[in-house]
Image: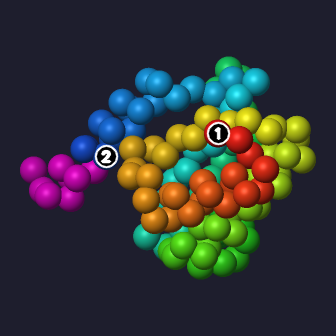
């Protein structure tokens, strides 16, 4: 098994482990974050209905999401869009990633934008 495949499998296991404890509902939807090498994506999901209530990404904002500044802009944008659909409290889903760097910057910017975790 290649090293990259092992790395992906470990990430998938961590993601599933954290998703056992983090589920969104109508009262507190889930703020899910995905990061790639170049971009970062965030969406507010109501798992009881399976609907995405609000989303933002560095692709849609046409910014560089591969750095902390881009993650902060995405965090602010998702907070504004979530509040537009009257969502104030969310559960944070970091998708098995460490709470560090771009993930932390997005979360802090979303908090500054008015979301409560």
Q: Is residue 25 visible?
A: yes
| Residue identified by numbered label 2 | 11
| Residue identified by numbered label 1 | 117
Q: Nearer the viewer, residue 106 or 52?
A: 106
Residue 98, image x and y in percent? 39, 52
Q: Is residue 47 above or below residue 8?
A: above
Instruction: Assign a secondary structure to mark 1.
Output: loop
Specify whether residue 58 is painted magenta. Answer: no
Q: How is the image coloured?
A: rainbow
> Which residue is at the far top?
48
Q: Who's the residue at 31% across and 46% down the image?
A: 11
Q: Who's the residue at 52% across and 53% down the image?
A: 34
The magenta segment: 1-8
The quarter holding residue 68 reads bottom right
**Magenta segment, prevailing SS (helix, strand or loop):** helix
Q: Is residue 56 visible?
A: no
Residue 8, image x and y in percent? 28, 50
Q: Who's the residue at 39% across and 38% down the image?
A: 15
Q: Is residue 66 above or below residue 5?
A: below
Residue 14, image x and y in percent? 33, 38
The C terminus appears in which quarter of the rendering? top right
């Amino acid at each position: 098994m290649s090293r990259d495949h092992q790395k992906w499998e470990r990430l998938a296991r961590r993601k599933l482990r954290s998703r056992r404890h983090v589920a969104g509902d109508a009262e507190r939807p889930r703020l899910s974050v995905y990061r790639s090498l170049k971009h970062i994506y965030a969406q507010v999901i109501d798992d009881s209905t399976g609907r995405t209530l609000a989303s933002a990404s560095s692709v849609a904002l046409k910014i560089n999401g591969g750095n902390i500044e881009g993650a902060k802009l995405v965090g602010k944008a998702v907070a504004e869009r979530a509040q537009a659909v009257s969502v104030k409290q969310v559960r944070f889903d970091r998708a098995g990633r460490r709470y560090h760097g771009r993930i932390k910057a997005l979360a802090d910017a979303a908090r500054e934008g008015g979301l409560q975790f």
